[in-house]
Amino acid sequence: MSAATDRFAGMTVIVTGAGSGIGRATAVRIAAEGGRVVATDVDKDRLDALAGELGGAGLRTVAGDIVDPLVIGAILAEAGDRVDGLANVAGIMDGFLPPAEVDDATWDRVIGVNLTGPMRLTRAVLPGMIAAGRGAIVNVASEAALRASASGAAYTASKHAIAGYTKSVAFFYGPQGIRANAVAPGPVLTNIEAQMRSQYAAERVGPILRTTIPAPVPPEQLAAAIAWLLSEDAANINGAILPSDGGWSTL
């Protein structure tokens, strides 16, 4: 997959969930295009492996839970005075638990990682972006932001919410030069936990997925879309929810 060599030259971009999957592919791509990447993930070993692969090419890492305000502070400290881009990629699934079966722990954790964490990090970078008069934020939503038959209740709610939050940021801060967009992936070859923990969900959702879901794609395909939205190539795109799902959303 070809990439411009200097599209992010001189820019600092924060990438969450950078230890694996879409986040890792995004961090690698931005670094390859000349960007300084602040990569964060809950798994330190994966971040260390990423740092080893990139060979210190402008990479800084922060290990920790994105829901933790102290981790947000550590990310901002590593980023320094200027943050040009933010890719909120970190996310977790919910075992496909339907509304009558979702437990409080699953609900709180999924909402925390998929919505509260991105909100807190976005809130933290916005003042600097506003002061600079420019900045780009890309959130990873999901096919579950567009329909109810792709996950359980918590994940569906979190991804619908991150789509709405993206549009809110775009509305409020577009006049200050800030762009906020989201990608909505379909199935991607990552290590995200997607087992069904509900017999009813298996009976209700399973047949729909088996007949409609497209083949999983490599995470690099999502990274390409994220990098485009972060770059000046997408300068006129703000508040968009971009499906990258092999046409799943057209069904």
Image (tube, rainbow, N blue to C red):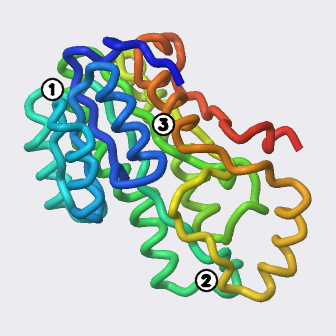
Q: Quadrant of residue 84?
A: top left
Q: Residue at x 50, y 19 (%)?
A: 2
Q: Name the disc covering residue 82, or none.
A: 1
| Disc 3 residue type (three-letter) | Ser
> Residue 192 at what x, y percent from top left?
52, 64
Task: Out of 113 and 161, give the one closest to the viewer.
Answer: 113
Q: Quadrant of residue 46?
A: bottom left
The residue indicated by pointer 3 is 168
Q: Residue at x 47, y 66 (%)?
A: 111
Task: Out of 56 and 168, give the one closest to the viewer.
Answer: 56
Label 2: which secondary element: loop
The residue indicated by pointer 2 is 102
Q: Are marks 2 and 1 in contact (CB under 8 Å)?
A: no
Which quadrant of the rendered structure holds the C terminus?
Answer: top right
Q: Residue at x 86, y 81 (%)?
A: 203
Q: Quadrant of residue 67?
A: bottom left
11 left or right of 28 in image? left
> Residue 210 at what x, y percent from top left?
86, 63
Label 1: which secondary element: loop
Q: Is residue 140 above or below residue 20?
A: above
Q: Dot 3 surroundings within 10 Å: few (below 14), some, or many (20 or more)?
A: some
Task: Out of 212 and 241, give the one closest to the viewer.
Answer: 212
| Disc 2 residue type (three-letter) | Val
Q: Dot 1 surroundings within 10 Å: few (below 14), some, or many (20 or more)?
A: some
> Residue 75 at what x, y percent from top left?
17, 47
